[in-house]
Image: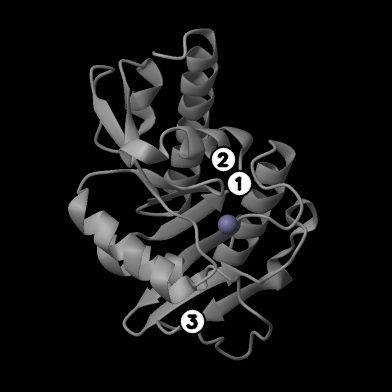
């Protein structure tokens, strides 16, 4: 399976799971490092119908590389920032209900911890449920230069995180390849829903 086929399949799957409804979310995978080339979803596509032909190739400035053509996702610069900061091989961005709610509820603290859950062991490098995972939250913006700069700063200040939230917007996570990044989406979405539902039972929790 090519990166484009894999990205399209993940888009359809995340749509089905309710994590990328309508045209929301965007997905990318590094094709080459030098020069940097990234396969990424085109802008404004229904993720439930995503096909491999709708995946573009971009360079480190976010410019589209022929023979692919089209408008890359509006959040392309955030994908580039994460690939450059962390050396990630794939970056996946969802707009789930729980990431939207929790990113709003906890924004005053700049993030929140998830700890004690068995499912934390699905995150790369985590071997015990006793792990304490910090989920940083950045303020939302339509200025992608500003948001990608803010993301780069946040990643420098929070080494070792596996993902972060944008307030009232959604989640970003990544991995060494698409398989690992997709696993991180499943694990983090499970954990966010668990934490969110738990806090509804006991708000101070
Ligand atoms: Zn988004």
Q: Dividing the image into four quarters, tell me where ligand 1 lies.
A: bottom right
Disc nearest the viewer among 1 and 3: 1
**Quadrant into which the N terminus falls:** bottom right
Answer few, some or many: residues within 10 Å of disc 3's Cα (few below 14, many 20 plus, some between 14 and 19).
Answer: many
Q: Is residue 69 left or right of residue 171?
A: right
User: Tag 2, which secondary structure?
Assistant: helix
Confirm if mark 1 falls within 8 A of ligand 1.
yes
User: Relative to 167, is 195 above or below?
Assistant: above
> Label 2 belongs to which residue?
100
Point out residue 52 in the picture as x, y percentages from the top left corner.
69, 66
Query: Residue 141: image x %, image y %?
Result: 50, 63
In the rendered image, the quadrant that contains the C terminus is top left
Above or below, 24 relative to 2? above
Q: Residue at x 53, y 67 (%)?
A: 75
Q: Residue at x 40, y 14 (%)?
A: 204
Tell me what residue is drawn at x 35 percent, y 53 percent.
Answer: 176
- Residues tagged 3 and 2 counted as in contact (Cβ below 8 A): no
Q: Which residue is mark 3?
A: 62
Above or below: residue 126 compared with residue 20: above
Residue 4 as seen in the image, left or right of residue 178 = right
Kindly check if marks 2 and 1 are in contact, taking CB atoms under 8 A apart as contact. Answer: yes
- Mark found first going from the N terminus, 1 or 3: 3
Question: Residue beneath label 1, please?
Answer: 95
At which x and y percent is residue 193? 54, 25
């Amino acid at each position: 399976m090519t990166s484009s086929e894999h990205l399209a399949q993940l888009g359809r799957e995340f749509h089905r799971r309710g994590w990328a409804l309508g045209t929301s979310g965007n997905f990318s995978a590094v094709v080459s490092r030098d020069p940097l080339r990234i396969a990424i979803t085109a802008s404004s596509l229904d993720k439930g119908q995503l096909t491999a032909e709708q995946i573009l190739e971009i360079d480190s400035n976010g410019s589209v590389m022929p023979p692919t053509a089209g408008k890359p996702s509006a959040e392309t610069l955030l994908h580039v920032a994460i690939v450059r900061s962390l050396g990630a091989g794939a970056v996946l961005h969802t707009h789930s209900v729980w990431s939207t709610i929790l990113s709003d509820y906890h924004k005053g603290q700049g993030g929140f911890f998830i700890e004690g859950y068995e499912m934390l062991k699905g995150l790369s490098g985590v071997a015990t449920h006793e792990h304490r995972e910090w989920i940083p939250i950045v303020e939302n913006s339509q200025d992608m230069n500003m948001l990608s700069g803010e993301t780069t700063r946040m990643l420098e200040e929070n080494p070792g995180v596996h993902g972060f939230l944008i307030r009232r917007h959604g989640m970003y996570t990544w991995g060494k390849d698409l398989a690992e990044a997709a696993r991180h989406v499943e694990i983090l979405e499970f954990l966010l829903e668990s934490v969110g539902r738990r806090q509804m039972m006991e708000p101070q929790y």
